[in-house]
Image (cartoon, rainbow, N blue to C red):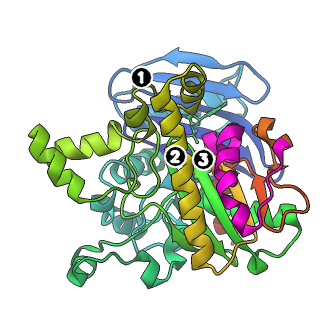
Amino acid sequence: MNILVINCGSSSLKFQLIHSETESVLAKGLCERIGIDGRLVYQPADGAKETTDAAMPTHKEAIQMVLDALMNEKTGVIKSLDEVGAVGHRLVHGGEKFASSAIITDDMMKAVEECNDLAPLHNPANIIGVNACKALMPNTPMVGVFDTAFHQTMPKEAYIYGLPYRYYEEFKVRKYGFHGTSHSFVSKKAAEILGKPLESLKTIVCHLGNGSSICAVNGGKSVDTSMGLTPLEGVMMGTRSGSIDPAIMEFIAKKENLDIDGIMNILNKESGVYGLSGVSSDFRDLENAAAEGNDKAKLAREAFCYQVAKIVGSYAAAMNGVDVIAFTAGVGENDGLVRKDICKYLGYLGLEYDEASTNVRGKEAYVSTQDSKVKALLIPTNEELAIARETLALVTK
Ligand code: ADP
């Protein structure tokens, strides 16, 4: 079966058409600038990337363009929409309502809508994407795969904040966590690589990208994760501050005469390694700047690695041990120096770093020595494939 995986943002839409038996990507691409002007980037598996500028006033026109490209006589990979067996949608926030992926129905989408105020930037865009797809492919089964679902196994002591309890009861203020599809995929892959049952392993997944989160996976279940009610909590990221003393918000607001929106903008867009370095949110730029003697870029990298290592240590404590630490996403897969600088802190756990892994990029590899008591691995994440697998499992049930 061919499965169309859709990841909708407010003005963008990424897609992949995946053949479920071979798990190969038949075509992929993205629509950008939806609602502004519109651009489709389309790439069939065995062809060149094509870019087409075309009006996309809404996500519906964008999805129509994607379907047309997939069926295009010259570079298309299917002849008709009948060849799309199912659609898997990435949905960001499922609140406490969804502990797993679910077949999309009207009632299900109502429940997703009720989570909108927990993810006001993401969920409405996701819903628009689902509705646009349903309008164009009314008879194709669709599945929603949530970023938050994997973390619904966290125990209450891990997800509750030290706030008046009524905020949890009335407004569902709690830790939810994100990147669940990636943490689930990578923790399963780690067990496969080690040749051990997932149920027997204590795993810590470091998803380090532009957004970063760390997850403690005990016996295949998420028991803690660094992002919280929103993706702002946890380690510092490309432009997000991560966890800070909350009183800093009032302090800076008074100093700079900012309202809450102004403060949130600073914490989401002007902070993290970008804010610290004043150079870039991209670790490649930080590395280059640090090599040229830029002390702030060096500090940003060091502070990032320190924060990741501290959370890894706290999760080893939470699980009373750790067997394997996995690095994934843009930074985790590509930046050997970041992996090395994080592992440097973890010798006390019994992790012996393998110097030879520093230059490895973007493929499965050991980051620790073979004899290391605690293993460290590089595992490329593949959220689209994970969504396709979940979708297949639900529509063939
Ligand atoms: P997102 O959170 O947007 O999905 P990704 O997981 O794709 O982000 O990670 C993007 C980040 O990965 C970039 O901002 C950059 O910091 C980092 N990155 C990508 N390639 C490299 C590389 N070759 N070396 C170091 N860092 C890299």
Answer few, some or many: residues within 10 Å of disc 2's Cα (few below 14, many 20 plus, some between 14 and 19): some
Label 1 or label 2, whichever comes before in sequence order = 1
Residue type (three-letter) at the residue carrying disc 3: Val
Q: Nearer the viewer, mark 2 or mark 3?
A: 2
- Position of the C terminus, as image quadrant, is bottom right
Residue type (three-letter) at the residue carrying disc 1: Gly
**Quadrant assignment, res 32:** top left
Q: Which mark is residue 38?
A: 1
- Magenta segment includes 352: yes
**Quadrant assignment, res 386:** bottom right
Alpha carbon distance from label 1 to label 2 = 36 Å
The vertical placement of 106 against 356, above or below, is below
Q: Secondary structure at mark 2?
A: helix
Front position in the image: 228 or 289: 289
Residue at 82% x, 53% y is 21
Across and down, in percent, residue 389 comes to 70, 59
Residue at 86% x, 65% y is 194
Residue type (three-letter) at the residue carrying disc 2: Phe
Alpha carbon distance from label 3 to label 1 = 20 Å
The answer to whether residue 56 is seen in the rendering is yes
Q: Main secondary structure of the magenta part?
A: helix
Q: Secondary structure at mark 1?
A: loop
Q: Nearer the viewer, mark 1 or mark 2?
A: 2
Alpha carbon distance from label 2 to label 3 = 32 Å
Q: Which mark is residue 203?
A: none
Q: Ligand 1 lies in which image quarter?
A: top right
Q: Which mark is residue 5?
A: 3
Q: Which mark is residue 304?
A: 2
Across and down, in percent, residue 216 comes to 60, 69
Answer few, some or many: residues within 10 Å of disc 3's Cα (few below 14, many 20 plus, some between 14 and 19): many
